[in-house]
Amino acid sequence: MAVDYYAVLDVPRDATVEQIKKAYRRLARELHPDVNPAEEERFKEVTKAYEVLSDPQKRELHDLGADPFSTGGGFGSGFGFSDIMDAFFGGQASARGPRSRQRRGQDALIRVQIDLSEATFGTTKDLQVETATTCPTCTGQGTAPGTSPKVCDICRGQGQVQQVTRSFLGQVMTARPCAACQGFGTVIPNPCVECGGDGRVRTRRTLKVKIPPGVDGGTRIQLAGEGEAGPGGGPPGDLFVEIVERRHPLFQRSGDDLHCTVSVAMTAAALGTSIELETLDGPRTVEVRPGTQSGQSVTLPGLGVQHLRGAGRGELVAHIEVLTPTRLDAEQEDLLRRLAAMRGEEGSNGQVATEQGLFSRLRDAFNGR
Ligand SMILES: [Zn+2]
Ligand SMILES: [Zn+2]
């Protein structure tokens, strides 16, 4: 469909010649270049509309979807060949019409590094975001202030050009996007200087992003409408903030549980002890029962990471590593030998765990002993 001259003159499609004249006079008074130089393009458009709609022949062609101002084609009448084809075929080849300059912007992705404590309790981050935003000078239209796009001369506003080719079926009409206007149907004769006609400029801004407790590496937070602005003043895409979690020097995260290793001297493991552990919630005491074996663990419930969905937190698991003393001095060695003798463990080179022993150790592990 070419330019709708009824819309240009703001008259109904069944307007009488008198109504069309009246509408033109009113608009011409308002838009005449002597009165309003900035509106020159619109004045021309309105005049063109009047010329067409006041002439019954041209009006009929326009109603059939053709543009009576076509200059192409070899017909001396001033009407292009394809216009005539349009008139005969009801403009079916141009039914798709020009494409809009306005499109939705793309989604954008940025990554943010947080530490374990921030993942556990949530945080708010100031993020530097660089995306396309709507050009403030032309508000996305791409035209220099005071100017407007004009109808493409090549495709006469249809956004596509038609070709008639001969085939065994007879004449076939095909349409391809107009190269002169990239299919928009209009060209911008005076592009906005700030954005070069794209309607967008790149802007760096600081965005406050709320990061909820419980996020993990790879979690994406979606911020609707904070992505790239769309071309031609189109709506923006979304911004995705992807979480990257820094390694913690002490705790390894597994789901919402945290794990760490606590080293205990052999004697302390045998006699029992309590160890102060600096958790994400401050210092907590890890109770090591007498007779604790290397590899056993102590669980501190509720000190892990907050569940992202649902209430509650994971647990903190302290894995006990029993340290066997090395470099004993003579007195210490003597003491240990006496202990071994007392326990009947002299000369024992260790023993293979019996099934019984293995099961009881497994049971101990399950019971947290
Ligand atoms: Zn601009
Ligand atoms: Zn064009």
Image: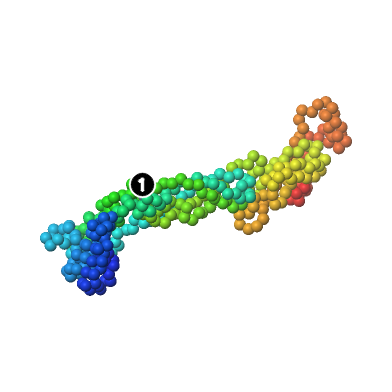
Total number of numbered labels?
Answer: 1
Q: Nearer the viewer, residue 99 or 331?
A: 99
- Quick one: quadrant of the N terminus? bottom left
Estimate the x, y position of residue 262 in percent, counting from the top left. 72, 40
Q: Amino acid at mark 1?
A: Glu
Q: Which residue is mark 1?
A: 194
Please give the name of the residue rendered at 29% of the width and 50% of the height, measured from the top-left corner: 190
Residue at far left of view? 76
Is residue 277 visible in the rendered structure shown here?
yes
Q: Nearer the viewer, residue 354 or 5?
A: 5
Is residue 355 visible in the rendered structure shown here?
no
Q: Nearer the viewer, residue 350 or 126?
A: 126
Q: Where, by quadrant of the figure, is residue 54 drawn?
A: bottom left
Q: Which color scheme does this rendered protein use?
A: rainbow
Estimate the x, y position of residue 254 in percent, counting from the top left. 63, 48
Q: Where, by quadrant of the figure, is residue 332 drawn?
A: top right
Estimate the x, y position of residue 162 in percent, counting from the top left. 23, 59
Please give the name of the residue rendered at 70% of the width and 52% of the height, measured from the top-left corner: 302
Q: Is 273 placed above or below 56 here? A: above
Residue at far front of view? 35
Q: Is mark 1 within 8 Å of ligand 1?
A: yes
Estimate the x, y position of residue 282 in percent, counting from the top left. 71, 45
Q: Is 177 placed above or below 127 here? A: below
Using a 10 Å C-alpha cutoff, classify the residue at mark 1 as few (fewer than 14 neighbours), some (14 to 19) or many (20 or more): some
Please give the name of the residue rendered at 21% of the width and 62% of the height, measured from the top-left corner: 48
Looking at the image, residue 209 sits to the left or right of residue 167; the answer is right
Residue at far top of view? 330
SS assignment at label 1: loop
Q: Nearer the viewer, residue 280 or 348?
A: 280
Please give the name of the residue rendered at 19% of the width and 65% of the height, measured from the top-left corner: 51
